[in-house]
Amino acid sequence: MLNVIDKRLLKEVADLHAIPQGAFNIRKNGQGIQLHSTANIELVAKTDKPGLDVLIRPGTRGESVHLPVLLSEGMEDLVYNTFDIGAGSDVFIVAGCGIHNPSDRKAQHEGIHEFFVREGARMKYVEKHHGEGDGKGERIFNPRTVIEVEANAVAELEMIQLRGVDRTHRDTLVRLHKNARLIVTERLLTHRDQEARSDITVDFVGEDSTAQVISRSVAQDDSRQVFHLNLRGHARCRGHIQCDSIIMGQAQVSSIPEISAFHPDANLVHEAAIGRIAAEQLIKLMSMGQTEQEAEETILQGFLK
């Protein structure tokens, strides 16, 4: 059952204050502890490996799926989830993961998610990572997300990780078919000696497919970040990458935007910027009564909003 810590983690990773409405599965330390399907969204346990098949009926609109994962000290969890989002549907999916690790043993979660966004469907997918605990044991997340966006469909991804996670490698691969659309917003903050890598690859395989990828990050103390954002145009398409990072202390950030065109009508743009907080921003907020630390926090919160 859920204890006080579990409930706090649910709030952090899935904005849940109670058992959600709609379809959901709560997974704790490698086991599903509460599962609920609806008339339009069926959650079926896989028989060959840990995880679920999430089956969303065509035309389903205004419904949600919550798949939070909770992990404790010394636990390692691997889960495979497959989502089939029916044609013409419009759904909201949350698959956050929270680790509470107060020990010296590592806790690690690896989630492999595969999505099929069928013709004319729209999906918003939120994946939030949260780590906590005073022990020296590492909190590790390695998610892999593979998305097939069929004709006239839309996939919107929001990926959030703000402090608390020691090591992460997020790998995202997307294929866009005719008139398909992708919107990605990534927000990341690392501190102390944390390490984070994000690889996003988008293949435009259908005419008039479009993608916008926005990544914003803050690297503090001795943390290290690597971003590799890759757009590959195989047809007439439009794609835009914007990668902005604030660097502080002795941190290191590598931003590698890459665009490749294999069609004369592929229109691909990338932008990348790394810099420190502007002194004039700090001075302005401090002149309004904030301390330097408070001013920095205000600027960072606005940047990552």
Image (spheres, grey):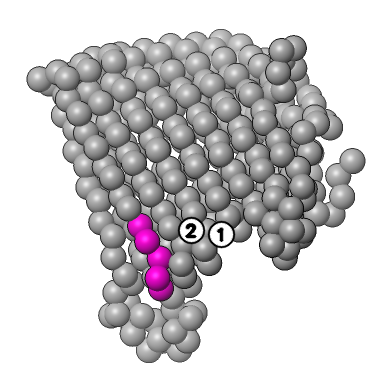
Q: Residues within 10 Å of mark 2 (few under 14, many from 20)?
A: many
Q: Indicate whether 45 appears above or below 94.
A: above
Q: Indicate whether 172 appears above or below 301.
A: above
Q: Indicate whether 242 appears above or below 137.
A: above
Q: In this view, does 46 lie to the left or right of 230?
A: right
Residue with the mark numbered 2: 189
Magenta-drawn segment: 249-253
Of callouts 2 and 1, which one flags the residue occurring earlier in the amino acid sequence? 1
For the point 50% across and 42% down, the residue is 169
Query: Residue 59 shows which numbered tag?
Result: none
Q: Distance between the residues labelled 2 and 1?
A: 5 Å
**Main SS category, magenta section:** loop
Quadrant position of the N terminus in the picture: top right
Mark 2–mark 1 contact, CB under 8 Å? Answer: yes
Looking at the rendered structure, the secondary structure element under dot 2 is strand
**Where residue 101 sits in the image (x, y, percent)?**
74, 55
**Where residue 300 sits in the image (x, y, percent)?**
43, 66
Residue with the mark numbered 1: 163
Among all residues in the image, which is located at the extreme left?
A: 264
- When asked about the image quadrant of residue 165, the answer is bottom right
Q: State the residue in front, 241 or 61.
A: 241
Q: State the residue in front, 92 or 222.
A: 222
